Amino acid sequence: MRPLDENETTVVFEKIFKFVGNNLKNIVENPSHEGPGPKPEAGRYCFRLQKSRVYYVSESLVKRATNISRKNLVSLGTCIGKYTHAGSFHLTIMSLNLLAANAKHKVWLKPTSEMSFLYGNHVLKGGLGRITDSIVPGDGVVVFSMSDVPLGFGIAAKSTQDCRKLDPNGIVVLHQADIGEYLRDEDEL
C-alpha cells in the first residue's frame, strides 16, 4: 500500500470533484478519531493505492497496517475506486457513502422506478421525483430514493431546465453504479 503519486491524485480528485464540487475539501480534511479511551487519537483520512484500487483510510490505520506485508494485505479502509488496465479511474459503489454525504447534485427517484435503477438501468424522466437546480449535462449526480436513502450515482444527461421539457421516456441520468451491484458483482467487489 502506497500513497498516490501526483498524477494519480489529480485523476482521483477530478473524478470525486465531479460529484462533490467544492465539498472535496471536506473529504480531504475530514478528521479521524480512532482508538480506545476517552481521548481518541486524532488524525486525518488519506488516499492509498493497493493493487490498482484506491482506498480512503485513516492515517492511524495506515500506520498499523505497515506490519502486514503488501502481498498479504487484501483491503484497508473504504475502496472508493480502481484503475483500469488502460489507466483510467472508475469510482466503485463502495464510494457511495462518501459521495452521498458531500453530494453537490442530487436526484430523487419515485418508488416505482427505484427497482429499475437498482437493476442497472438509466434514470428516465418518468421516474424522476425531484432534482436539484443548476445541474449541467456531464455533472456527477447522486441518486436517492424519496426517503433519502442513497441508491447509486451517475452522470447527468440533461440539465435541470431540459428535464422539465423532456418526454417521460427521455434519459435524465446515465447509470454508473448502484447498490444492486453488491449482489450482481459480489465476486469482484
Image (cartoon, grey):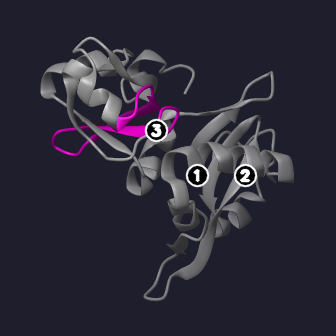
Q: Nearer the viewer, residue 32 or 164?
A: 164
For disc 3, the marked residue is: 136
Q: Earlier in the sequence, mark 3 or mark 2?
A: 2
Q: Residues within 10 Å of mark 3 (few under 14, many from 20)?
A: some
Q: Residues within 10 Å of mark 1 (few under 14, many from 20)?
A: some
State yes or no: discs 3 and 2 in contact (Cβ < 8 Å): no
In percent of the image, x 37 and y 30: which residue is there? 179
Q: Is residue 142 above or below residue 43?
A: above
For disc 1, the marked residue is: 77
Residue 165, given in percent of the width and then of the height, sits at: 26, 24
Camera-nearest label, 3 or 2: 3
| Secondary structure type for disc 2 | strand
**Range drawn in magenta:** 137-160
| Dot 3 amino acid type | Val
Residue 118, given in percent of the width and then of the height, sits at: 32, 21
**Picture quarter with the C terminus:** top right
Q: Earlier in the sequence, mark 2 or mark 1?
A: 2
Q: CA distance from mark 1 to mark 3?
A: 32 Å
Q: Residues within 10 Å of mark 2 (few under 14, many from 20)?
A: many
